[in-house]
Image: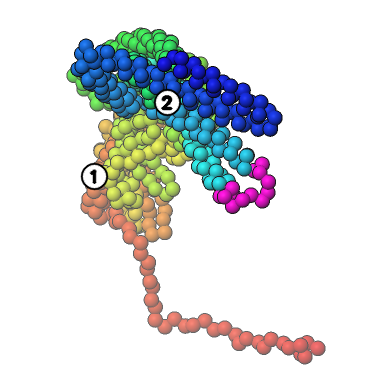
Amino acid sequence: MSLKLFFFKLSLSLLLVSNLLHAEESGALSKLDQIKNAISAEFGDKNREINQTNSSTHAQEKNSTNPDTPQIISAASANKKTELLEKIEKLDQEISKDNIWAKMYSNYRLYQRLLEEEKAIDLKIALLKKKKKPLAKADEELLLKYKTEMNTISGKLRLLEEYKDDPFKEILQPKSTEEIPGVSNPIHIVTALSFKKRMLDEQEEYSERFESLKEIVDKLKTQKLIVTDLLKLDENSSEYKKQFEEIDLKLKTYIPLVEIFETTKNVYNKKVEEIKIKLSGEIKNEIEKTFTIGGILLFFFMLYLLTKFIAYRYLVDDDRLYTINKVLNILLVTLLVIVLLFSYIENVDYLVTVLGFASAGIAIAMKDWFMNILGWFVIIIGGTFHVGDRVKVSRNGLEFVGDIVDISLMRLTLHEDVTLTTYMLNRRAGRIIFIPNNYIFTDMIANYTHSGLKTVWDGIDLMITFDSDISRAVSIAKDVSKKYSKGYTDITRKQLNKLRSQYSIRNTNVEPRIFTLIEPYGVKLSVWYLTNSYATLTLRSTISQEIIERINAEKSVSLALPSQSLFMEMGIQRPHFPPEEPIPTQEDLS
């Protein structure tokens, strides 16, 4: 068999040389390639025949010893191949199922294939454009087809633009840590705990992403081993070789990512751990600070309650009790503000500077509020008004008389009483009147009980006839007014003597005063006396009633009413007037 093969090769070689010489003479070098291919094919056929012959001879020798061996080997190989293929398919499903790495890699590979297709189509379009014009109809249709495909591919590439350079850059990087919140008050504790929880969740998500990448690499390595086993079973399978190359390409992409990811993850974990330790320390310190401040505030509050309890238990005077209650409230609020201000404002100078710049705008926008607060300071410090004082407020033609029941930061609160003002003007009483504190700068507010002075002058007017006994009427009015104002006269005398050291008071006469005045319809007696500031109308009614009763009992005194006397006389002659002379005309004068 080998001798025949030798002579066959020799004859083919001589044929090749003769044809080569002929090709050089004729210039048809393409004939040479055809001959080479024919020789290769012939040699291949002969080699396959020899191999088949040898293998058949070898198989016959084997079959002569054990005729069932080939069937057993082929069955075992088929079973093993099926098993390996099932493993690869299962691993493919696990890798591609809800895995962001696999999806991103798939998009990345798709982008690369589209780029290659774009280059190939671009080359085809360039070759068609180089042909002579006009193009054939088939070429024009082909060119239009290529351009359509080029537009489609360009659209897909624009959609996958993010996978152009580094598709895994965004997923490799952890989320940027936000500005770490400072813990400077109890509210910030909640913010810090929320930030800490969100940061730990992001860290856990990042670690899961890393574990997912490692799991893909391990499965790809397993796939590579399985494909290697398949190639051992079928070395000439182009499908397995292609699959092996694809897996190897994926591993070359993923393994460097694992190394980069692991380094980034270590740095990120250390940073998270530092932030976590810092936040935990700040939260702990703030909790301790909050409990300390809470203890101080609780101490002040308990002291406040104890003081109020003692005041309510041992003080009888309502005015003093009210004053102490107000002082305690203001003191407690002031202490709370000071403690909280110096505990939670780190830079007080900064606060003062900001308030200094903002004060002008705030003063304009909140003018009435500031004026009320200023009025409150004037009232409290100056002592112009106190709770319990009876005052009269006049504004825009309206008058209100009542007792001050509260002095707050913004307003005075009055309880309107039944007085001469309500009797003559308002005809209403018992209302709660709120007077803004800034009214003390712009309106008239009269205090009936300032500096402990609890009395006021009140007057009653009487009209008697001209023929009445005026001296007797004055005596009656003086006796009655002295009788009922005696106690108030003594009290007022003592209070005025005290006030003379504070005010320049010259007239300290406190006895009742009677004034006699001539009026068109009679003689008016004006009776003035001191009375209680809180009961003027009551004493006025009592004195008026008794004066009327005593005057009515006197025959020499009569009360006068507005009246007019008419004197009628019969036979009164009319006055005689001379006849009027005619007025001279212009002609008479001429």
Q: Is residue 132 magenta?
A: yes
Residue 109 to residue 400: above or below? above
Is label 2 in contact with label 1 (beta carbons under 8 Å)?
A: no
Where residue 413 appears, as percent x and y from the top left, is 33, 36
Find the distance from the CA under tag 2 to the CA under tag 1. 109 Å
Q: Amino acid at mark 2?
A: Tyr
For the record, the magenta segment spans: 129-141
Where residue 221 appears, as percent x and y from the top left, is 35, 15
Crowding at label 1, few (<14), some or many (≥20) Cα neighbours within 10 Å? few
Where residue 437 appears, as percent x and y from the top left, is 41, 34
Where residue 306 appears, as percent x and y from the top left, is 22, 15
- Where residue 21 sits, quadrant-wise, is top right
Crowding at label 2, few (<14), some or many (≥20) Cα neighbours within 10 Å? some
Q: Amino acid at mark 1?
A: Thr
- Where residue 99 sits, quadrant-wise, is top left
Residue at the image position 53 percent from the left and 46 percent from the top: 145
Quarter of the picture holding the N terminus: top left
Quarter of the picture holding the C terminus: bottom right
Q: Which residue is mark 2?
A: 105
Residue 542 circle label: 1
Residue at the image position 35 percent from the left and 61 percent from the top: 562
Seen from this angle, which residue lies furthest bottom?
587
Question: Which secondary structure, mark 2?
Answer: helix
Q: Is residue 489 magenta?
A: no
Indicate how the structure is coloured in the image.
Answer: rainbow
Name the front one of labels 2 and 1: 2
**How many numbered circles are shown?**
2
Residue 520 in sight here: yes
Question: Which secondary structure, mark 1?
Answer: helix
Residue at the image position 23 percent from the left and 44 percent from the top: 542
Seen from this angle, which residue lies furthest right?
590
Upstream in sequence: badge 2 or badge 1? 2
